[in-house]
Structure formats: C-alpha cells, structure tokens
Image (cartoon, rainbow, N blue to C red):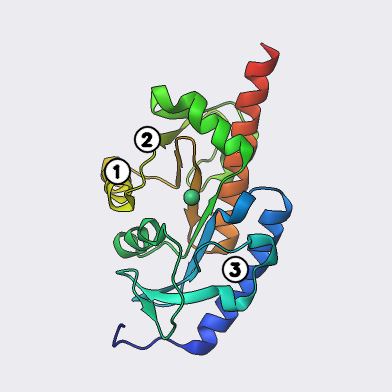
Amino acid sequence: MSSIPFDPARLRQVAAEIVTAARELAGLGWTPATSSNFSMRLDADHIAITVSGLDKGRLTEEGVIAVDLDGRPVATALRPSAETVLHTRLYRREPGVGCVLHTHSLVQTVASKLFAPQGAVRLEGYELVKAITGITTHEMALDLPVLPNSQDMAVLADRVDALLDAGPLLGYLIAGHGLYAWGRDLVEARRHLEAFEFMLAGELELRRLQ
Ligand SMILES: [Zn+2]
C-alpha cells in the first residue's frame, strides 16, 4: 500500500463521474462481457480506476478504487483492472492527462483487425477529426496507431511509450482488442473516444460500400 494519502472525497466525486460515463458507454454496446476500463486522475500520485471484471452497465461507485502510479491499490482489498499499467504509465509520463477511457466496441475491434497489418488507420476528410485536440481543420489527417495485442501489459505499455516518444498521441487501437483514448478531463477523453469510434465506423462503412 502506498504511504501517500489521497483525498477520499475526491475519490467519491470522481467515482460518480466514472460510473455515469461507464453506464452510458455500456449502453452503446461498447463494453461487452465485462471488458473495458476507465480511470481519472485523483492527484499527482493517484488515479481512480475501475476494478477488474465488472459489468460496466451495472457499475457502482464501489467498483471504482484508488491506485498509485505503480498500479498498487490504496485503502482497498479490491483488485484494479488487469490493464491498469496502460493507464498508470500514461498518467506518470503525461502530467496533463486527467482521464483515460478504454472500450471494446465491435467497430473498434473489427477496425483494429482490418488495419493491424498497416500498423495504423489514416483518418482524413472527416469534419469530426476536429474533435481531436490540436486538429483545427478537416484537411488534416490523423494516423491512429494499431498495436499488436499481447497478454503482457508491460509489453503493451512499452509499445505505447515508444509511440509517445515519436510524437503527440491521444489514442491507439490494440489489434483484435479495442481502443484507448484520453484527454485532460473526462469531457475531452470522451470526445476523443466518440470521434475515433465514429471515424472508424466511417472507414468500415466505406469499405463495405466500395
Ligand atoms: Zn481491454
């Protein structure tokens, strides 16, 4: 257990926000079979994250716990998401990140398999690309990386670190698995998640029609 305390009132407030978002995303069908995980920053040393293996459509505030940036649970006997290191590594290296959302929608999963051989999906010509922070015109293209899947989360976290070393990044796909998106707060992270989902659905639909 971490010796540095966190504010329990802040955890309760953040847990309520995560529960609302999780249930809404579950309602869209983006969190099948207890998959997906969500986190928000509590302070410089802690995040709140969903516990392992819960139905996100039935998530309650007890399903959100505090962990330190090494992923160790604080003041709880519950186990955080198996993918916690993919959250904590991001919060540790990017002080501006306040929220990380990870879902497994069908669109995200199919697109991640389709584009895995290229290592990225090029998103361009979409008005919605402007929903991604830093992009100001639909004429800008955005390459959403596709990482090979692994059951070794430290390996995946190293691959994400390498992507971040190469330049700005606000999301990535894992092949056959799902999408990670983040932002300075829940509102921005969710806007990114929804914009990526929409543009990936567009790419799949275009291929269906061509
Ligand atoms: Zn996952």
Estimate the x, y position of residue 107 in percent, counting from the top left: 62, 35
Judged from the image, the secondary structure of the residue bearing numbered disc 2 is loop
Task: Tell me, for residue 148, which label it has, or none.
Answer: 2
Q: Please report the residue visible at 46 percent of the width from the left and 76 percent of the height from the top.
A: 78
Evaluate whether residue 70 shows in this view: yes
Judged from the image, the secondary structure of the residue bearing numbered disc 3 is helix
Residue in the foreground of this view, choosing between 206 and 136? 206
Evaluate whether residue 31 shows in this view: no
Query: CB atoms at circles 2 and 3 under 8 Å apart?
Result: no
Query: CB atoms at circles 1 and 2 under 8 Å apart?
Result: yes
The type of residue carrying mark 1 is Arg
Question: Split into 4 quadrants, where in the image is the C terminus?
Answer: top right
Estimate the x, y position of residue 148 in percent, counting from the top left: 37, 35
The type of residue carrying mark 3 is Ile
The answer to which of marks 3 and 1 sits earlier in the sequence is 3
- Residue 136 lies left or right of residue 43; in this view the side is right
